[in-house]
Image (cartoon, helix red, strand yellow):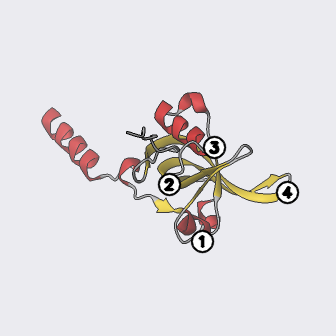
Amino acid sequence: MTKAILLIFVSVCLVSPGKSQDKAMDVCTLLRSAKSHEGKIVLVTGFITADQHSTAIGSEGCYRHVIVRYKSDSQPHDFVAGVEDKRLKLDPRPFRVTVEGRFQRRVRGPLGYFSRIEVTRALSWEFIGEKKTANPPVQKPQ
């Protein structure tokens, strides 16, 4: 009897889809169906843009962005460092991320309304391409 219950439990765990198995959507897909995602936890992938006032996620071929907000002490250090490198313009390469968080399609701001993701987990992040040095090495005359 105990083995049967254990076997059923393991089978259900293997068959049931978990959040980590959900496929991440890009920003355009999220915004096209914003009403149906309102207030829900979403998994989004895209490229980070940041300046001194805001951080947003966008995707290729999509002119719209979604503001991302997160607590830096609750996210991985490398994710936060990558966002700050974009904010300070220390790295010009595209910074691709996948984040999980609660989506709000209409948040009031000082200049109107915007969409936002309250990030609960940064799942992946990477700079795309080779990093180029700002100043090429100086060659000494011979």
Q: Which element type, helix, strand or loop, lies under badge 2?
A: loop
Read off the residue under disc 4.
111
Q: Which element type, helix, strand or loop, lies under badge 3?
A: helix
The circle on residue 87 is: 3
Q: Residue 33, image x and y in percent?
A: 59, 69
The circle on residue 32 is: 1
N-term-proximal mark, 1 vs 4: 1
Disc 1/disc 3 C-alpha distance (Å): 27 Å
**Circle 4 residues within 10 Å: few <14, some 14–19, many ≥20:** few
N-term-proximal mark, 1 vs 3: 1
| Amino acid type shown at disc 4 | Leu
Q: Which element type, helix, strand or loop, lies under badge 1?
A: helix
**Foreground label between 1 and 2:** 2
N-term-proximal mark, 2 vs 4: 2
| Amino acid type shown at disc 3 | Arg
Disc 3/disc 4 C-alpha distance (Å): 21 Å
Which quarter shows the N terminus? top left
